[in-house]
Amino acid sequence: MEKVPMTAAGFAEIEAEVKRLKSVERPAIIQAIAEARAHGDLSENAEYHAAKERQSWIEGQILDLDDKVSRAQVIDVSKLEGDTVKFGATVTMVDEESDEEKTWQIVGDLEADVAKGKISISSPIARALINKEVGDSVEVAAPGGARTYEVLKVVYK
C-alpha cells in the first residue's frame, strides 16, 4: 500500500471534506431520493435518477477520500528546518531571465493549488527543487521551454 505524503493542514482539509460529505451531503441526498420516490413512477422520474446519480458520486468521493486518509503519511512541516528544499518547504526563487520572484510551498498531490502557491511534490518544478539549497540554480523543463531559477529562501512553516 503506497503512502500518500501530505502536510498536516492538507490532511485536516481532507478529513473535513470527508466529514462534510458524510454528515451533510449524504443525508441531504437521501432526503432528495425519498422526495423523488414520493412523486410516483420511478422509470420516468428525472429527479429520482439525478438524485441517485448524485448519491453514487458522493459515495465514490467518500470512498476515495477515506482511502487517501488511510494511506496518508502526514508530515509536520513546522518541525522541519534548514536551507535544503524538502517536502513541505516554502521556497522563494527568482527567474534568472525575467527577475520575477515566485514563492511556492511543496505539498502532496491532493493539496496542490497553484492559485494558493502550493505545488505538488510530483510537479516538474518541485522535483527540480528537491535537495537544492539557497543560492543554487535550478533548471526546470516547462511547456514554454527550459527556465532557470535561483533559490533565494527556504522556509518551513
Image (cartoon, rainbow, N blue to C red):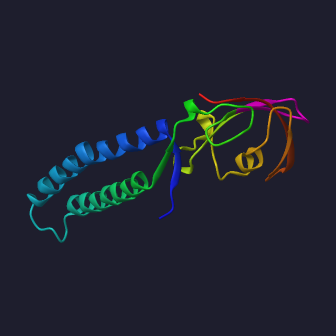
Tally of numbered discs: 0
* Residue with the most extreme right position: 97
Residue at x-position 24% and y-position 64%: 49
Q: Is residue 130 magenta?
A: no
27 horizontally vs 129: left or right: left
Q: Is residue 137 above or below residue 1?
A: above
Q: Is residue 97 magenta?
A: yes
Quadrant of the image containing the C terminus = top right
* Residue with the most extreme bottom position: 43
154 horizontally vs 108: left or right: right
Q: Is residue 64 above or below residue 9?
A: below
Q: Nearer the viewer, residue 119 or 70?
A: 70
Q: Is residue 87 above or below residue 36?
A: above
Q: Nearer the viewer, residue 52 or 42?
A: 52
Residue at x-position 15% and y-position 68%: 42
Quarter of the image where one finds residue 116:
top right
8 horizontally vs 41: left or right: right
Quarter of the image where one finds residue 86:
top right
Q: Nearer the viewer, residue 101 or 74?
A: 74
Q: Nearer the viewer, residue 6 or 26?
A: 6
Residue at x-position 19% and y-position 69%: 44
Where residue 43 sits in the image (x, y, percent)?
18, 71
Which range is magenta?
91-102
Where residue 56 sits in the image (x, y, percent)?
30, 62
Where residue 52 sits in the image (x, y, percent)?
24, 62
Residue at x-position 34% and y-position 47%: 18
Where residue 74 sits in the image (x, y, percent)?
49, 44
107 horizontally vs 30: left or right: right
